[in-house]
Image: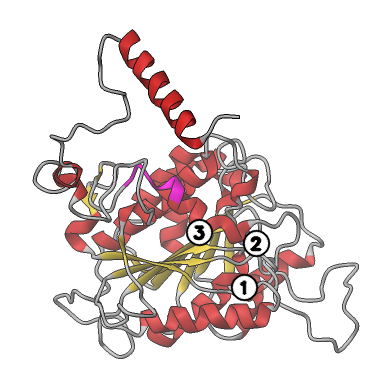
Amino acid sequence: MFSDSALRSLVILSVGLATASRGQEQPMHAPSPDVNMTEVFSYPVLPVYKEAWTRESWNGLTTFAAATPLRCFGLDAESPYDVAVLGAPFDTTTSYRPGARFGPNGIRQGSRRIQVTSININMKTKVSDYLDVVDCGDVPMVPTDNKVALRQLEAANKMLLNHTSLRSYEGMSIAKDGKFHPRVLTLGGDHTITLPLLRGINAIYGPVSVIHFDSHIDTKKPGSMPNSPWLPGEEIPVSHGSYFWYAHNEGLLAPDNKNIHVGIRNALGSWADYDNDYEVGFVISTAEELEEVGWRGVVKKIRETVGDNPVYISLDIDAIDPGSAPATGTPEIGGITTREIKKIMQRLEGLKIVGADIVEVAPGYDTQAELTTIVAANIGWDMLALMAKTPLVE
Ligand SMILES: [Mn+2]
């Protein structure tokens, strides 16, 4: 056994020998007394480090498209903005593979190479020139009670929408109260979240036309499936396949079939589901139709359907072909390509987009290359560009 002092001598001797063998250099980990590390990491030596939120595309805290992070329900509740990005981490009404509760942060991660301050070449715009976009983080949604979780989102969304937006515009606002309100881009979450979101939209604008990108129609009449597990008279909970039926029944959708599904290709439970879908208020553009008439034909059909109505865009990532976007709960083959969705988004310019969501991104099923979250993030970025290009005036 060595005594403490003997051990210390031995260590010093070893370091000395190692130093000697490298020709009298200082030990590698000893900082040079001439370097002031505080100075190195502070302005003006390296100005990028002055702002704690500033980041390269691969580091730092992650908000959607590098939007300003804001504690929208807490300390920053009074701060004005034009668009709030809101995460809705909820997946307990999915019918097949769960996992969309991780969607919001997955989409933020997928957005690292796009910024609200960068130029969108296709859309010929720079979002931050027209809109102040903030990222409000995620609404706490309890995983053990869907009714409570959906109420939490409804309350949060209404809180954001009830603000007056930072910017106002020449002309009359299309809002019922004549004021300019912020718009919300919600990152889901399974598709049921669209129901509480539309309730908030309805309170501000009244019924709106919905452009619904999805491989499934999501208008299923509760209890209509052939082997319904619900007993007669039982209250049937809303799901990600039936929320539009509820939205129609609550008067949230524009009347006279001014709503459209785009990308439809799912198997139906029964032929009656088609009739029911029309009664709920939609027309259908199938994925096959897109192949036949091209993006120009689909854009024409969308614009003819929604007319001059206020528009809410709801995009289920399963509308996109699973080759490009595999990370979702109910994938269907034969979907929209990323080039097609970008072209369609671009040509929706001029529509009065009052809000939007991107749902059903379940990053657990994604590739190591993060394909799905990158697709979702880029579509969200185009949605912001559409909002930037059209103020909500009469
Ligand atoms: Mn859906």
Measure the C-alpha gap from mark 1 to mark 3.
Answer: 22 Å
Q: Earlier in the sequence, mark 1 or mark 3?
A: 3
Q: Earlier in the sequence, mark 1 or mark 2?
A: 2
Q: Which residue is mark 3?
A: 104
Q: Do callouts 1 and 2 mark residues in contact (Cβ within 8 Å)?
A: yes
Displayed quadrant of residue 206:
bottom left
Q: Of the residues tagged 1 and 3, which is closer to the observer? A: 3
Per the image, label 3 sits on a secondary structure element best described as helix
Mark 2 Cα-neighbour bin, 10 Å: few <14, some 14–19, many ≥20? many
Measure the C-alpha gap from mark 1 to mark 2.
Answer: 9 Å
Q: Do callouts 1 and 3 mark residues in contact (Cβ within 8 Å)?
A: no
Does label 2 point to a residue whose CB lies under 8 Å from ligand 1?
A: no
Q: Describe residue 310's horizontal placement relative to residue 2 as left or right.
A: left
> Residue 301 location, x and y as percent?
47, 56
Q: Describe residue 203's horizontal placement relative to residue 327 as left or right.
A: left
Which image quarter has ligand 1? bottom right
Q: Earlier in the sequence, mark 3 or mark 2?
A: 3
Q: Nearer the viewer, residue 77 or 192?
A: 77
Mark 1 Cα-neighbour bin, 10 Å: few <14, some 14–19, many ≥20? many
Q: Is residue 101 magenta?
A: no
Q: Is residue 111 magenta?
A: yes
The correct choice, above or below, for 38 with respect to 159 in the image is above
Q: Nearer the viewer, residue 167 or 261?
A: 167
Q: Residue at x 17, y 79 (%)?
A: 171
Q: Describe residue 272's horizontal placement relative to residue 85 as left or right.
A: right
Q: Please report the bounds of the magenta region as a residue range.
A: 109-114
Residue kind at label 1, given as amino acid type:
Phe
Q: Which residue is mark 1?
A: 244
Per the image, label 2 sits on a secondary structure element best described as loop
Q: Which residue is mark 2?
A: 217
Residue kind at label 3, given as amino acid type:
Pro
Residue kind at label 2, given as amino acid type:
Ile
